[in-house]
Amino acid sequence: MLPAVLILNGPNLNLLGSREPSVYGSLSFEEYWKELKKDFTDFEIGYVQSNDESALVTAIQDARSQYQGLIINPAAYTHTSIAIRDAIAAVGILTIEVHISDIKKREEFRRHSMISEVCWCTLSGMGLKGYHLAMERMREYFRLGV
Ligand code: DQA
């Protein structure tokens, strides 16, 4: 059976492509997503985007029964959401945090992530490529166990 990974994107990431292109690039996630799926046919990949915190928490809880890996970009909730942090800790799925921009080099209020401590690792500032790198990390883990 193929390992299954859920990509979960938070608020305003549905606007990628038109949203602040100098920070987030000019490709929509839907366009990027097609490329990602082509490069990782050895995985089943699910994708959910929501602007709603409770929907993100529910998606993390529901992931338990279907997915072995989670790649999450909680967007603005990164900096505020104890609920998302607790959900990640509760389900115990191997989780990678991704940020398109480098949150450590932006405004003060973006520098702290509520979720980093409960994630396996964080990739920040690599653009959309961060999702590819996260999938490669997942591949290594599911092939080699590291
Ligand atoms: C983001 C960084 C967050 O601070 C911001 O609120 C986002 C996107 C990123 O991917 O760089 O919406 O998570």
Image (spheres, rainbow, N blue to C red):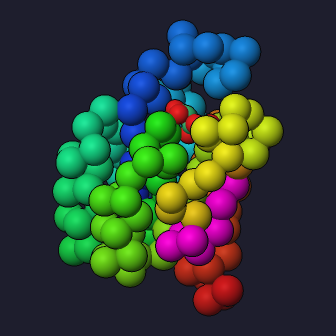
The residue most toward the front is 108
Depth check, front residue: 138 or 3: 138
Between 117 and 123, the one lying in front of the other is: 117
> Is 43 placed above or below 45 here?
below
Q: Write down the quadrant of residue 48 in the picture.
A: top left
Residue 29 in sight: yes
The residue closer to the viewer here, 68 or 97, is: 97
Q: Quadrant of the N terminus?
A: bottom left
Q: Nearer the viewer, residue 27 or 43?
A: 27
Quadrant for the C terminus, please.
bottom right
Most extreme residue toward the bottom is: 145
Q: Position of residue 95 (x, y in %)?
A: 50, 68
Left or right of 115, for residue 53: left
In magenta segment, residue 121? yes
Residue name at image x 46 percent, y 29 percent: 13
Q: Which residues are magenta?
A: 117-123
What residue is at 60 percent from the left and 20 percent from the top? 27
Q: Residue 8 appears at what percent x and percent y?
A: 40, 49
* Count of numbered marks: 0
Q: Quadrant of ligand 1?
A: top right
Q: Is residue 125 visible?
A: no
Task: Tell me: 93 left or right of 54.
Answer: right
Residue 30 is covered by the magenta coloring? no
Residue 41 drawn above or below residue 13: below
